[in-house]
């Protein structure tokens, strides 16, 4: 597909072209990755200053988490220091709430674990979290869930490796670790939404993590228009109708404002 690409010097024109493409779309599926949350102070994973430049992801596989108390201690300490629970939504998150309120958005499918879409005001029912939610912890034995804040309070009180108060099992963040499969219900729902969508806007994702990236691919296969907003190249650039290489916090509010103007009142 010969899409139209706009670099940071052409953001205004890029937004205008994307807005024209999406002007009559009423079932827009939004797909988000770490880049939408960097303005909220949450680092991405694969960028030049991303998490994986400082931490070896092989240290945090599911099998190592279960087998190694030191891995669990480090994981909880990193969670405590990350600030992810205190992060606030930014302009891009808030703009997507507006897109929902004007009736143009089908849902958000997100790779993020920060819960900022809900914190911005989107109903939980329209946010599909493919990789879990850092605000919860889950027992790997009895599947009981507890707020992560409670677990971190126990860490702060001196418990390096808090266990489940219900059964004594291992607690882990309720997020998808390496070696874990994505949750079946959320994955199925995301794929069904992809078939319903008449357009997809991918925001802040390199679109290189599978099976999550199959979501926009499925939508494209059924005829959906495809807009990418990302600071760098993605694995699916060749499939896009419009590519805008700019910050989500600038591009998304302007795009939603343009779509709001084209929405009948």
Image (spheres, rainbow, N blue to C red):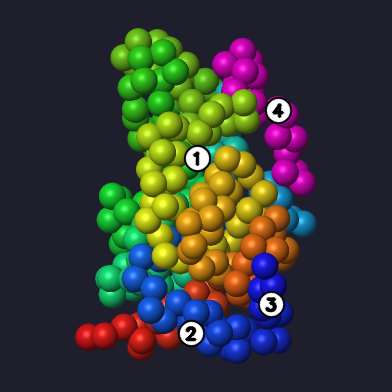
Q: Nearer the viewer, residue 168 or 48?
A: 48
Q: Which residue is mark 2?
A: 20
In the depicted structure, whether residue 155 falls above or below residue 109:
above
> Does residue 78 belong to the magenta stretch?
no
Magenta segment range?
52-71
> What separation in Å lies between label 3 and label 2 (alpha carbons)?
15 Å
Q: Which residue is mark 4?
A: 59
Residue sticking out furthest to the front: 222
- Count of numbered circles on the image: 4
Point out the tag, 1 or 2, that comes first from the N-terminus: 2
Quadrant of the image containing the N terminus: bottom right
Point out the tag, 4 or 1, that comes first from the N-terminus: 4
Q: Nearer the viewer, residue 24 or 145?
A: 24
> What separation in Å lies between label 3 and label 1 (alpha carbons)?
29 Å
> What separation in Å lies between label 4 and label 2 (alpha carbons)?
46 Å
Q: Which residue is mark 3?
A: 5
Q: Position of residue 199 (x, y in %)?
A: 46, 66
Q: State the predominant SS element of the stretch in magenta.
A: helix
Label 2 packing within 10 angstroms: few (<14), some (14-19), many (20+): some
Q: The residue tagged with tag 2: helix, strand or loop?
A: helix
Point out the tag, 4 or 2, that comes first from the N-terminus: 2
Q: Which residue is mark 1?
A: 131
Q: Is residue 163 left or right of residue 2?
A: left
> Does residue 63 belong to the magenta stretch?
yes
Q: The residue tagged with tag 4: helix, strand or loop?
A: helix
> What separation in Å lies between label 3 and label 4 (alpha carbons)?
38 Å
Tag nearer the camera, 4 or 1: 1
- Numbered tag placed on residue 146 in the rendering: none
Quadrant of the image containing the C terminus: bottom left
Circles 3, 1 touching at the beta carbon (< 8 Å): no
In the depicted structure, whether residue 156 falls above or below residue 224:
above
């Amino acid at each position: 597909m010969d899409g139209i690409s706009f670099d940071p010097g052409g953001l205004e024109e890029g937004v205008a072209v994307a807005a024209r493409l999406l002007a009559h779309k009423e079932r827009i599926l939004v797909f988000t990755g770490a880049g939408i949350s960097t303005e909220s102070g949450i680092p991405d994973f694969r960028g030049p200053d991303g998490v994986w430049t400082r931490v070896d992801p092989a240290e945090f596989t599911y099998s190592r988490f279960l087998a190694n108390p030191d891995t669990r201690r480090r994981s909880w300490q990193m969670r405590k220091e990350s600030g992810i629970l205190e992060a606030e939504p930014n302009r891009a998150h808030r703009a997507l709430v507006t897109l929902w309120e004007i009736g143009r958005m089908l849902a958000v499918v997100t790779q993020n674990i920060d819960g900022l879409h809900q914190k911005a005001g989107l109903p939980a029912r329209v946010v599909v979290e493919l990789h879990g939610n850092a605000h919860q912890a889950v027992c790997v034995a009895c599947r009981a869930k507890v707020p992560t804040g409670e677990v971190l309070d126990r860490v702060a009180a001196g418990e390096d490796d808090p266990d489940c108060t219900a059964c004594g099992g291992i607690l882990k963040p309720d997020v998808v670790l390496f070696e874990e499969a994505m949750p079946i219900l959320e994955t199925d729902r995301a794929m069904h939404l992809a078939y319903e969508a008449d357009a997809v806007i991918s925001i802040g994702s390199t679109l290189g993590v599978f099976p999550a990236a199959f979501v926009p691919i499925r939508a494209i296969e059924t005829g959906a228009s495809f807009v990418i907003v990302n600071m760098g190249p993605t694995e699916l650039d060749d499939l896009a109708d419009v590519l805008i290489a700019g910050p989500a916090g600038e591009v998304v509010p302007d795009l939603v404002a343009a779509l709001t103007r084209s929405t009948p009142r």
